[in-house]
Amino acid sequence: MRRCLHCQTGFTSAAWQCPHCGFAPPLREGRRVFAPELAESDEAYPEEAHWRFQELQDNSFWFRARNDLIQGLAERYFASARAFLEIGCSTGYVLSALKQALPRARVCGSEIYSAALAVAAERVGETADLFQMDARHIPFTAEFDLIAACDVLEHIADDRAVLQEMHRALAPGGGLLLTVPQHPWLWSWADELACHQRRYRSGELEEKCRQAGFSIVFTSSFVTSLLPLILLRRFLARKRDMDGLWKEHALPSWANGILFRCLDWERRRIVSGGRFPWGGSRVVIARKNDSVQL
């Protein structure tokens, strides 16, 4: 069901014009814009950054391994999903993995910055419904069987509000697939450059999910085997700027291959139900409690 962000009325018509108040979100370059005041890229995320990520992701051990993990978990826990939404789809890299994992599902992707949607459209094509949105105000109710937010919540100050919005936007029995950076003691210049609000404490995201009306289905750390390397890299890094951050994803092919194999071993363990107690990232699968009304 669609939801008017102007008067909060729910409606099922094919058009986005609200039948109650007549409001319709504007179109920009053929895509709906639900939060136009936030749509322009800022200094932290200039427009060219999205294209830079697009160039790096296919050859980065981190992005490849995380995509494989997300795809495996989606296939295991959400194989029957009829519609899914990725919040913060950026370049469409994760969206393309979810699309592969759930080929029969309707594909939706949202971004707060409109510029990123052009990059995502180039990757996923016209089969996905892409729109600009503030995740604190999702224009749907009981619409999706899966909502994914992969390394997104740490950017949002009021992550609790986003989780509550996700709960309302999910259909009965629907669920979440979330990844976040973990352990405040790993906080570094890289988190500041990435505009993170937090790194999550152990159990913090799970508790926030419960408070928002979800049951935890599965949770595990990820990037466990590379923890010593992460600490060493953060400590020794000489260039603590965006160029230094980009270079972390532009390693020689031999180094990329070794690091990918480490994370791929973790991925196989996690997808088969194994858990790691600590690691640079956290993955959480949660289901909506339909009896909870927020």
Image: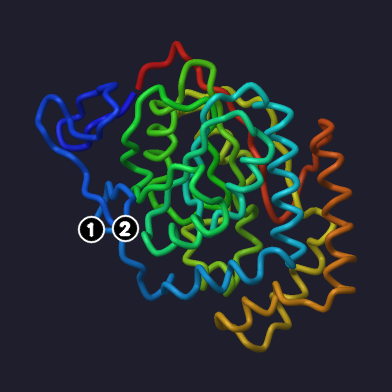
Vertical order, 200 against 161 (above or below):
below
Q: Which of the numbered marks, if any, corresponds to residue 171? A: none
Percent from the top left, x then y, of residue 275?
80, 37
Asked if 232 appears above or below 114 in the picture, the reply is below
The numbered mark at residue 37 is: 1
Looking at the image, which residue is at 65% across and 54% down? 183
Q: For the residue labelled by badge 2, is the local secondary structure a helix, a strand or a loop? A: loop
Amino acid at dot 2: Glu
Q: Secondary structure at mark 1?
A: helix
Q: Which residue is mark 2?
A: 29
Image quadrant assignment for residue 219: top right
In the image: residue 188, left or right of residue 109 = right
What is the x, y in percent for residue 273?
81, 31
x and y, in percent, of residue 6 in the image: 16, 37
Q: Residue furthest front?
A: 126
Question: Could you tell me if the residues under marks 2 and 1 are in contact, i.e. CB atoms within 8 Å?
Answer: no
Question: Nearest the camera: 35 or 206?
Answer: 35
Q: CA distance from mark 2 to mark 1?
A: 16 Å
Which quadrant holds the C terminus? top left
Q: Is residue 171 above or below residue 117?
A: above
Amino acid identity at mark 1: Glu
